[in-house]
Image: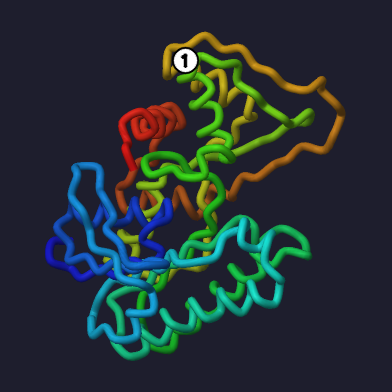
Amino acid sequence: MSGVPIVVTGAGGWLGQAALEIAHKSGAAIHAFGSSAREQRLLDGTTIPVLPLSALGKQVLPGALVLHMAFLTREHAARMDEADYIAANRMISESVASFIKRNGARGIFVPSSGAVYAPPPNPYGACKLEDETRFTALGEALSIPTVIIRVFNIAGPFINKQNSYVLACILRDLLANRPVTLRAAHPVWRGYAHVNDVLSIAMGLLLAGRSPPVFDSWGEPVEVSDLAALAAKVVEKELVIQRPEWRDGAPDYYVGDEKAYLSHSTSLNLAPSGLEQQIRDTMTYLTTSTT
């Protein structure tokens, strides 16, 4: 992707930072946008200037790959008035859509979420679903390759929300030589995809000029106690789990469908990272990052 212009919105988020890292390593011409003006530091110490998203309306960048990761998260949905939350996300999406209408694009990637499958009330999932419809229609209208992946669980560098994401919590406990605290008294299943794999699949499809139907990210299903056991093996720490007494509650199963994800990986000659490697890369970031 040397010299290819890449527009990254939501550059300060997990996917956004990982996208900047991939784009930087490939020699792309990076144009980053976030919630405010700042500099974003990459793993090698390089800093990327980030412009406020409001500046996107003034940009003339024809033919860029547009990686649109700007979105108000579940945390915002929980504390904002629902109408305000929906309006704010629509404003973000419209600013990006307007940029694409003015400049065109070589391709559009929009990460959606497994939350779209959850029942209402679900403003986060509803807004993600609305974005799916908006950008699919935009890509079709302008004949721009468009990839939308419903992201479930990811792992790897630039992991954020380290006090809430279960893998980060497990690793932080292990690295601090603490018992691993798991709060659920019922089965909790997750399926992890490496953040770099998700982005590589998306960009590979775009560069090939493809617009597949919306599909899920996927990883081999794992119950969180087994995830903790594998993490302990990777970091070479003794495992002690603190978990409430087991109850016969309904399983919490948050895992995508594997068919399209694996098919697209194969078509691009990409081998998805196994869970052990994902844990190792996440641990490396947690232990070496100063951001």
Residue farthest to the top, as pictured:
238
In the displayed structure, would residue 24 be above or below residue 218? below
Coordinates of residue 177 in the picture (x, y in percent): 50, 14
Q: In the displayed structure, does residue 149 sit left or right of residue 286?
A: right
Closer-to-camera residue (1/291): 291
Give the residue pinned by disc 1: 233
Image quadrant assignment for residue 100: bottom left
In the displayed structure, would residue 40 be above or below residue 68? above
Res. 7 in view: yes
Closer-to-camera residue (200/93): 93
Q: Quadrant of the N terminus?
A: bottom left
Coordinates of residue 79 in the picture (x, y in percent): 68, 61
Instruction: Give the secondary structure at mark 1.
Output: helix
Res. 264 in view: no
Residue farthest to the right, as pictured:
248
Residue at 30% across, 62% down: 38
Count numbered badges in the picture.
1
Residue at 32% across, 56% down: 19
Q: In the displayed structure, does residue 2 sit left or right of residue 130?
A: left
Coordinates of residue 39 in the picture (x, y in percent): 27, 58
Residue at 29% across, 86% down: 58
Q: What is the three-letter code of the residue carrying label 1?
A: Lys
Image quadrant assignment for residue 169: top right
Q: Residues within 10 Å of mark 1 (few under 14, many from 20)?
A: few
Q: Quadrant of the C terminus?
A: top left
Scheme by which the image is coloured: rainbow
Residue at 69% across, 34% down: 188
Coordinates of residue 138 in the picture (x, y in percent): 45, 84
Q: In the displayed structure, does residue 65 sit left or right of residue 272?
A: left
Closer-to-camera residue (191/71): 71
Q: In the displayed structure, does residue 256 sit left or right of residue 8?
A: right
In the displayed structure, would residue 184 be above or below residue 291? above
